[in-house]
Image (tube, helix red, strand yellow):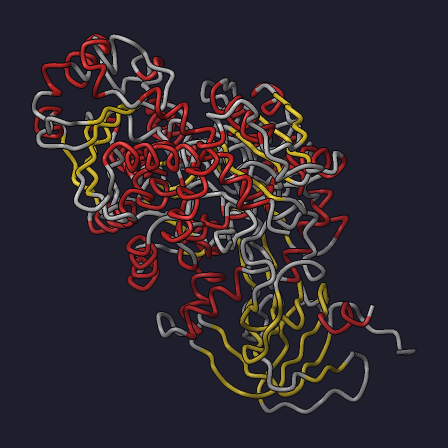
Amino acid sequence: MARKDSADSFFLKDVRLLDPATGLDMNGHIRVENGLVAEFGSIPAPSSGMPVWEGEGSIVTPGLVDVHAHFREPGFEYKETIESGSRAAVSGGFTAVCVMANTDPVNDHPEVTLGMINKAREIGLCRVFPIGAVSLGLKGETLTEMGALTQAGCVGFSDDGLPVRTSRLLRRALEYAALFHRPVIDHCEDRDLSDGGVMNEGWVSTDLGLKGIPPASEEVVVARDLEILKSTRGRLHVAHLSTAGGVRLVRDAKRRHLNVTAETCPHYFSLTDEAVRCHHADAKMNPPLRTEEDRLAIIEGLRDGTIDMIATDHAPHAPFEKEREFDQAPFGIIGLETAFSLGLDLVKDGYLDMAMLLYLMSVRPARVFGLPRGEIRPGGLADLMVFDPSQTTVAGVPRFRSRSRNSPFSGQKMSGRIRMTFVGGKKVFDEQEEREE
Amino acid sequence: MSDFLTSPHLLSVEDLTTDEMNGIFRTADSFLDLSSRTVKKVPSLRGKTLVNLFYEPSTRTRTSFEIAAKRLSADVINITTSQSSVVKGESLLDTVRTIEALGADGVVIRHPSSGVPEWISRRVGCHVINAGDGLREHPTQALLDLYTILKRMGRFEGLQVAIVGDILHSRVARSNIRALTRMGVRVRLVGPPTLIPADRKGWNVDVFYDLKEGIRDCDVVMALRLQLERATASFIPSLKEYARLYGISPQVLRLAKPDVLVLHPGPINRGIEIQDEESFHPHSGILDQVHFGVGVRMAVLYLLMAGQ
């Protein structure tokens, strides 16, 4: 195109517009100007001044928001960088991503936080929001300077990868983080009960002769956290719920009006520990894949609002780390590029409707963590995702933009196709352009 | 002869049909006849190379495979790698490359991590024989245990076999449970609740926490080796208490059938799993296990590798 376009304005023709925050669901066109939604519906095409794209019946929605990813930078750039992670995010429809603190150095000082934010801005793909560490060096001993970290841009605090080590530290963290209106996110695991386990403890671990992590390992820490939360003014966010018991505890806590939110990840509602029978460490993550009973309880938790949101726990590891003995390989799988497809399967199977899925993957996580999000209303932020639910793609290389490829879904046909992603009206992903490259 | 195995590998007893197991036993019979002659070698695997790749210390299994392969005239290379080099990050892919570079026709592998033989088998072009992986499988041990039972008891059908001890951490138990139930044997698991997997819904077994009840009217008692460190990890309070509650003594054995057969995969912790072994010597099948092991492993190597 010879004409000089403003990078954050465009016109998208013939789309279905869906915004679960307002209940919007209509067909029409949408015009974005200077990074904001200008108007939509049966509106005339602009005569000039902005690019015009054909929507061809695709769905336009607010972009997805992930509150739990690992971008590994600084320190583990061979697994992922802020750039490769951002590319993975936007190709999966995500416009905002929270990144965990278990980098090297750990994100326990404002300089680390600012470094991440500046890097992400330079790259200019998705919005990146660092999560600060609860304790210095994730050691579970001394609280980080949460005031300074908040000021630098941290949106929550977590020792993720590890649980907040002691009950006393969790109590202080919840009390202190409340001062800055930030949640404490806990990876709920009793590591003494896990005792070196590598998969869910149950029939499959008995059969495979692999050391199990009992469901109680998650449940006892969820229970601990909730009882401590009760006596603080703090806010607790339970990371990656995987067990039926964990869902039950959170449901009960919400009935008691405790200030708690919870997330689960796509693999916990898509797979069970039967997936470990392949003996490949791409089926190894922490918490581990559980049983069918747990899987159904997780879905029920999403349906009844016990679980507030779907997060990815995107955890890249290099092939040489995963291509080895199951019990020696590190925990974690990548998820940014498969999350939405797996969510669509819940819609296809009749568990959720499309609006509910988008609520769980965009509206709710943004609200809980106070993040900017796309809105399809005049003046709304144009952080948008365009997708075609009727098409499919195949997960894995060469599609994956992540630097790593540790996904149990590799080679599988995935529902839906993300066509474009916009952040502040700027097109940061175009599936067709990338395919033609 | 149609006893050759359909799978190119022996990774689990589940790779074998009951017909194939019986075929292995028949072949073992003829190889064991051979071992009573002065010249014990046959040329069946001449020109083939077998690599014994052991990532865990083992004398009897490695030696048994080595003798079996040599009696079949195969060339044998032993590689013993300590577990520490695995932990230090020696890659399994390097192992695969080593096997390929050696031009091996078969590899016998023992590894502390469950699932490794399967992992290797998908990446090398030769036969893979599992000599014990983690807590998962030890198929040739189960085959030689079954063969010993068959030779001593004359049948499988209707037998009651009690496996006693640390079921949770035992690949020998897992392989035997799978193989014995397939052959129509009724399997009992006997041990403290801390050493028996809580979820065992895929196993068709009876569980006893009391040794006397578990052994009553049994045809075969298979005692498992207890790793001595289980006491420090709180699976049991002490070896002394374990020996008192689960040690196989002549007194306890009187509750079993009069012609009861006692097996142990070795090496025995004397005074712990088995007490006063000499006193029930006629019931012991432990030396038979060692002797038959060579014949059974010859049969496995032959039926896997001599086919092509």
Residue B290, position as x, y percentages in the image? 40, 23
- Answer with left or right where residue B15 lies relative to residue B75: left
User: Considering depth in this image, is B191 or B27 the residue closer to the camera?
Assistant: B27
Q: Would residue B117 be seen by someone viewing this image from the given angle?
A: yes
Relative height, residue A5 to residue A325 (above, below): below
| Residue at x-position 14% and y-position 14% | B250
Q: From the viewer's side, name the closer residue of B204 and A87.
A: B204
Extreme residue toward the front, this view: B38
Q: Is residue A98 visible?
A: no
Asked if B282 appears above or below A148 in the picture, the reply is above
Q: Residue at x 55, y 62 (%)?
A: A64
Question: Residue reaching furthest right?
Answer: A2
B238 vs A23, nearest the viewer = B238
The residue lying toward the viewer, choosing from A208 and B179, is B179
Q: Position of residue B196 (x, y in %)?
A: 24, 32
Q: From what the image shows, is residue B58 above or below residue A1?
A: above
